[in-house]
Image (cartoon, grey):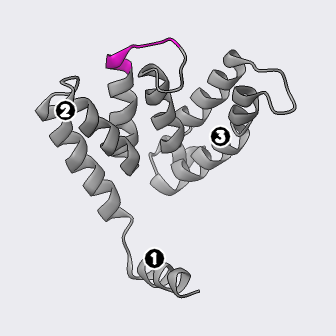
Amino acid sequence: MKRIKANDPVAMRREGLVQYKKGDYISLYHRGQGVEKDREKKMYHLEEAAIGGHPEARHYLGCIECNLDGEVNGNIERAKRHLIIAAVQGYDRSIEMLLAMFKDGFVSKDDLAAALRANQAAVDATKSPQRDAAEEYDQSC
């Protein structure tokens, strides 16, 4: 908890994964797999994972706000904020969504440029020779 308060990215990522695992109930409540469909519980777990730092959860919240899951919300400003946060965390699918929203006129050029720069900085921050070697090894298997 101390490292999270100090904004340590490794600790924040770990906490995000823990929250995401807790929020893995999202798909259960969304699809009604083994439980009754419950939008409130789905949203609760999704928001907990997003607050915990999970970029995919944050991205999905943006999609929900854009009505991409068929549910009625439609708050474009909230969707844009969720997607920008996910992009800043290095989640590339959010960049794709922001580009589409830019083409539709929902995202300004400045917001998109800032998100692209922050996304690139996040991606660059995670690069290391060890990660490159591990990725190369995974691809060779």
Please provide percent x and percent y for residue 60: 50, 34
Q: Nearer the viewer, residue 104 or 109?
A: 104
Q: Which residue is mark 3?
A: 19
Quarter of the picture holding the N terminus:
top right
How far apart in space, not on screen, are marks 2 and 1 (Cα)? 34 Å
Query: Dot 1, how many residues are within 10 Å of its Cα: few (below 14), some (14-19), or many (20+)?
Result: few
Task: Please identify the quadrant where the C terminus is shown.
Answer: bottom right
Where residue 44 appears, as percent x and y from the top left, is 65, 23
Q: Secondary structure at mark 2?
A: helix
Q: Quadrant of residue 99?
A: top left
Tell me what residue is drawn at x 46 percent, y 20 percent. 67
Q: Are marks 2 and 1 in contact (CB under 8 Å)?
A: no
Give the residue at x 53% y 88%.
140
- Which residue lies under the disc numbered 1? 131
Residue 76 on the magenta segment: yes
Seen in the picture, residue 91 relative to 64 is either above or below; the reply is: below
Q: Say which residue label 2 marks.
A: 103
